[in-house]
Amino acid sequence: MANNNAIAVLGTGIMGAAMARNLLAAGMEVRVWNRSREKAEPLADDGATVADSPAEAAEGAGFVLTMLADTDAVTEAAGGEDGALSTLPGDGVWLQTSTVGLEGHEQLAVQAEEHGTIYVDAPVLGTKEPAEQGQLIVLASGPEEVQERCQPVFDAVGSKTLWLGPAGTGSRLKLVTNNWIVGLLGTLAETISLAEAVGVDPNQFLEVIEGGPLGVPYAQMKGQMMIEEEFPTSFSANLARKDANLVLQAAEANGLRLPLAEAAAEHFDEAINAGHGEETWPPSTRQPSPTTASPVGQPPGVREVRDNGLTYSRDLTYRKVVFYRKVVFFRRAGVSTQPFFMPRLFRQSANFLGNRVF
């Protein structure tokens, strides 16, 4: 018989660790496991039991919650050697909260069926801060008969739970929402940049859309961060690229092409291939303001122009200038792994450069 007050949390990165702490705060018995044990050990100070394997974490538990990077990681933790499903009681529930896409969901659903495990597909919306505050949105889908049992878990980690239907519906909606977020952030960053370029206070733009049919609270929050150049770490390029790929796979499988998502994925690849998949913003990419100093080694009299906090000079090659402008977009989008390359469809640098640099 499963202990409904006991839960095994597999994956204690930024999201999983925050969710585990909120489950502890809700009075649950929490066992945690992470492939790199050192990431799980700090949770022992909060009252969690650190397990040596997923199987050990899940033994006798009422729930297994997976929050891992991708389908392969979830598959191994759940059903691999010493996997959690080997010890989860027959009436235990697997809460799969990772973003794995449509194919990933189908693979994990089959794995659950093979082990006779109750499977709930429940990806979440939100990053570091909402996870820490227990303000995630849970997109739950699965058997109706376990909804009441699962609700205390979802209430501990989120502010809102949507029960959407059969397992897999949650993953479908998560892909749709992720694609919308990419488009919104790209357009917002473009609009803030355009306002600054033409001499408009970008705060006035946010004021125009606030409270009306064009206004989005998310745009107010992110737009202010862009204006103030506050870019807290919340997501990596590797994970963003993974999510973009899941969107493109789903679109292709249904005969749809998404040019903006394709462009974003292409430039994520460039950043990752350049070695920036897990890095934070490198200060060396910032250029000094022309009002304070000139770039090192710049010949006297070379024309400068400052755009979005970066200083360009005509001795820079076209590709370098485009690179610096792309950096600005991804910083403003709030993705932690920079420098990034802005999708061409979000920002055509040539028009601006032709008028203001060369």
Image: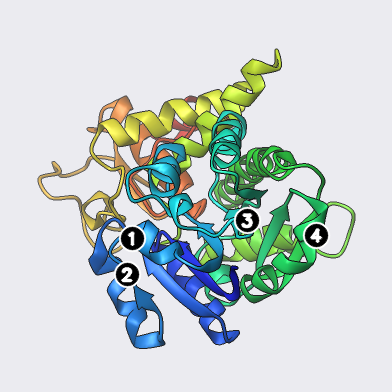
- Residue under the point 78% across and 42% down: 166
* Residue 347 visible in the current orientation: no
Labelled disc at residue 124 = 3
Q: Is mark 4 on a helix, strand or loop?
A: helix
Q: Is residue 227 left or right of residue 290?
A: right
Q: Earlier in the sequence, mark 1 or mark 2?
A: 1
Category of crowding for the residue at label 4, using alpha-carbon neighbours closer than 10 angstroms: few (below 14), some (14–19), many (at least 20):
few
Q: What residue type is labelled 2?
A: Ala
3 and 4 marks in contact (CB < 8 Å): no
Q: Which of marks 3 and 4 is nearer the N terminus?
A: 3
Q: Earlier in the sequence, mark 1 or mark 3?
A: 1
Q: What residue type is labelled 1?
A: Asn
Q: Which amino acid does label 4 sit on?
A: Val
According to the picture, the residue beneath numbered tag 4 turns out to be 208
Category of crowding for the residue at label 1, using alpha-carbon neighbours closer than 10 angstroms: few (below 14), some (14–19), many (at least 20):
many
According to the picture, the residue beneath numbered tag 2 turns out to be 40
* Residue 177 visible in the current orientation: yes
Q: Separation of disc 1 and disc 4 at Cα?
A: 46 Å
Please determine whether, in this image, residue 52 is positioned above or below residue 338: below
